[in-house]
Amino acid sequence: MMRLILRADVTGVGNKGDVVDVATGYGRNFLLPRGLAFVASAGAEAQAEGMRRSRDIKDAAARSAAEDVAKTLVSSPVKITARVGADDKLFGSVTAADIAEAVNAQTGLEIDRRQLQLSDPIRTIGTHLVPLKLHANVEFPVTVEVVGG
C-alpha cells in the first residue's frame, strides 16, 4: 500500500486534499505520473489540510450561488415556443440544450445543459417539470411551459 495526497478529485478514490492509501502499482503507474497525487509526508499532510479547507470554502460559495439560482428559477417558469402538429405533438422535440438556452434568454442565468436531468426530450406541449442539479446538494425542479407557435 502507498499513502498519497490527492491534488485533484479522483472518482472512486477521493477528493482534492484527501490522504488516501492506494495499491502501490495504482499510485506509481497512474496517480503520480498524471499529477493527480503526491507522496504523503508530515509536511505534505499539513499542506493537504490547507487544500481541504480551501475546497470546503469554494464548495460553500458554489452551494450558496446554486441556491440563489434555485430561488430565481423556482419562482418563474421557463416558456418555450415550438411548432406543433396534430394531437399537440411537436415537430421535433425540446431538448436540454433548448431549455438551457431559454433559461439564459429569459433570466440571464447561465446553466449547463448537462445539469438538466432530462431523461427523454419533451415531445408534447404543456407544463413539464425538469430536475436541475446545480450542486451536489442543490437539486430542484424547473417548470418548463412548452406552447405551440
Image (cartoon, rainbow, N blue to C red):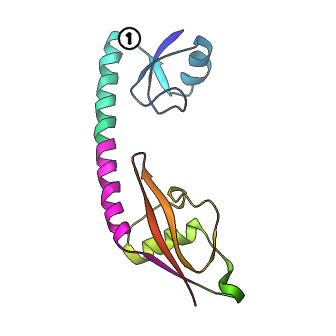
Looking at the image, which is closer to me, 69 or 44?
69
Q: Quadrant of the C terminus?
A: bottom right
Query: In which image quadrant can residue 136 be found?
Result: top left
Q: Is residue 100 left or right of residue 107?
A: right
Q: Position of residue 8 (x, y in %)?
A: 46, 32
- Asked if residue 60 is among those painted magenta in the image, a careful observer would answer yes
Q: Which residue is mark 1?
A: 41
Q: Quadrant of the N terminus?
A: top right
Q: What's drawn in magenta, residue-wise?
A: 59-81
- Asked if residue 61 is among those painted magenta in the image, a careful observer would answer yes
Query: In which image quadrant can residue 32 be found?
Result: top right
Q: Residue at x 56, y 72 (%)?
A: 98
Q: Residue at x 49, y 60 (%)?
A: 131
Q: Position of residue 20 (x, y in %)?
A: 46, 18
Q: Residue at x 42, y 75 (%)?
A: 77
The dominant secondary structure in magenta is helix
Judged from the image, the secondary structure of the residue bearing numbered disc 1 is loop
Q: Position of residue 86 (x, y in %)?
A: 71, 89
